[in-house]
Image (tube, grey):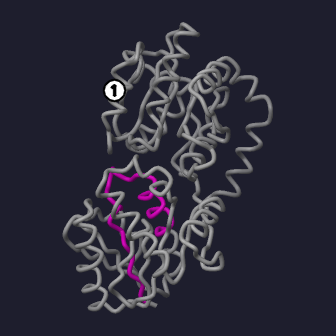
């Protein structure tokens, strides 16, 4: 079988959640199925590290698809022409996008429908594109994969898709995460916070990660619990809005917030392993959450590796700033007690169940 794959998010040193999903899943699929041939379709020069096996033919297809106009150009003009030429049996798109102008059978991956629940968190033309085309992609796809049962139910409800058409394929954890020695922890703390303890937030910086409330909660925590604890923010600024900027500039303790930008996997492993407390996402509302299972898995694995340190796996919901601040304060004092309540066993189970 010949399989064409949208690999436009495989960009060296710039992998985000969906990029990691594409990397981890396609690396295994291509190696485990040498009987099939894969066409990896990039929208720019690619790194050879993404050619996981000999049964992959890389194709560069311009333009760079990073704007609604270019999404349309790439998926509705360039992709149909390419598929007509290479004639694959299947088109796989790990980032949700499809082409409506091809008759090739397709499998797409919907990671979440956050733009349906919080459209204001997405730039105007991007959300218009998503909300117009993704229902059509859902109808067009031969099969849909998603990363959680919650997202499956959400797709069925929002787009009236039969649940029989949707497969749940859970995210896994990154094998690069490993325990740090005490000297290594000290080294990373010295590097990022001059040796001081810190909370860490990991994720691309945009409104749906709820940074506004995280900044407010950290301020409340610092006012109620005077300490030298820092807040380390790890991630690239994708959509740094005026609301986020306003909330940050109004912080009393903004000098205690440290932005690292995007870190490579080695640096990220160190920063996470040396943290006192880790939080990968602060949901706005548990009723309309989305499933960031890659962040959760890394948090749990990090907890397993941190030893005596505490990592919250975003398994609880905090509806108010005050509540979130209280939880941070409580956890910063009681992470050792939490560690003694069986977290290691839970993490070991997670290792077995959620490997890629």
Tally the numbered discs: 1
Work out which residue is located at the far right of the displayed protein and give it: 341
- Magenta segment includes 202: no
Work out which residue is located at the far top of the displayed protein and give it: 226
Image quadrant occupied by the C terminus: bottom right
Residue closer to the observer: 281 or 54: 281
Residue 109 image point, x, y percent? 49, 69
Would you say 53 lies left or right of 74 here? right
- Magenta segment includes 25: yes
Would you say 350 lies left or right of 229 here? right
Residue 347 image point, x, y percent? 70, 44
Q: Residue at 60% of width from left, 62% of height from top? A: 154
Q: Is residue 242 above or below residue 93?
A: above
Q: Could you say which quadrant of the image residue 39 lies in?
A: bottom left
Residue 129 image point, x, y percent? 33, 64
Q: Residue at 59% of width from left, 46% of height from top? A: 296
Q: Is residue 311 above or below residue 52?
A: above
Label 1, secondary structure: give it. helix
Residue ID for mark 1? 246
Q: Determine if residue 45 is in view.
A: no
Q: Residue at 41% of width from left, 74% of height from top? A: 53
Residue closer to the observer: 192 or 55: 192
Q: Is residue 301 above or below residue 34?
A: above
Q: Could you say which quadrant of the image residue 315 lies in?
A: top right
Label 1 crowd bin: few (<14), some (14–19), many (20+), radius 10 Å:
few
Q: Is residue 160 above or below residue 193?
A: below
Q: Residue at 58% of width from left, 62% of height from top? A: 147
Q: Determine if residue 218 is in view.
A: yes
Residue closer to the observer: 228 or 177: 228
Range of residues picked out in magenta:
2-27
């Amino acid at each position: 079988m010949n399989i064409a794959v949208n690999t436009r998010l495989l960009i060296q040193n710039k992998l985000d959640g969906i990029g990691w999903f594409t990397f981890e899943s396609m690396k295994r699929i291509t190696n485990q199925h040498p009987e099939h041939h894969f066409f990896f379709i990039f929208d720019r020069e690619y790194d050879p590290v993404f050619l996981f096996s000999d049964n992959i033919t890389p194709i560069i297809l311009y333009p760079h698809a990073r704007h609604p106009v270019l999404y349309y150009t790439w998926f509705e003009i360039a992709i149909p022409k390419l598929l007509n030429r290479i004639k694959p049996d299947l088109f796989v798109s790990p980032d949700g996008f499809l082409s409506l102008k091809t008759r090739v059978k397709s499998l797409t991956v919907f990671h979440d429908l956050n733009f349906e629940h919080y459209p204001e968190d997405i730039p105007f033309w991007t959300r218009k594109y998503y909300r117009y085309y993704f229902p059509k992609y859902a109808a067009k796809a031969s099969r849909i994969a998603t990363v959680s049962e919650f997202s499956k139910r959400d797709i069925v409800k929002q787009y009236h898709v039969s649940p029989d058409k949707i497969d749940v394929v859970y995210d896994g954890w990154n094998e690069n995460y490993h325990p740090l020695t005490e000297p290594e922890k000290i080294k990373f703390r010295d590097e990022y916070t001059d040796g001081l303890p810190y909370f860490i937030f990991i994720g691309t910086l945009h409104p749906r990660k709820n940074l506004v409330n995280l900044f407010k909660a950290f301020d409340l925590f610092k006012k109620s619990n005077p300490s030298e604890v820092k807040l380390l923010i790890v991630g690239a600024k994708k959509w740094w809005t005026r609301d986020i900027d306003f909330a940050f500039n109004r912080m009393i303790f903004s000098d205690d917030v440290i932005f690292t930008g995007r870190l490579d996997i080695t640096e990220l492993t160190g920063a996470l392993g040396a943290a006192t407390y880790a939080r990968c996402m602060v949901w706005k509302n548990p009723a309309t959450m989305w499933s960031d299972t890659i962040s959760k898995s890394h948090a749990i694995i990090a907890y397993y590796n941190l030893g005596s340190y505490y990592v919250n796996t975003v398994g609880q919901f905090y509806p108010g700033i005050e509540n979130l601040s209280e939880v941070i304060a409580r956890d910063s004092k009681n992470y050792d007690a939490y560690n003694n309540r069986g977290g290691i066993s839970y993490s070991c189970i997670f290792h077995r169940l959620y490997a890629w």
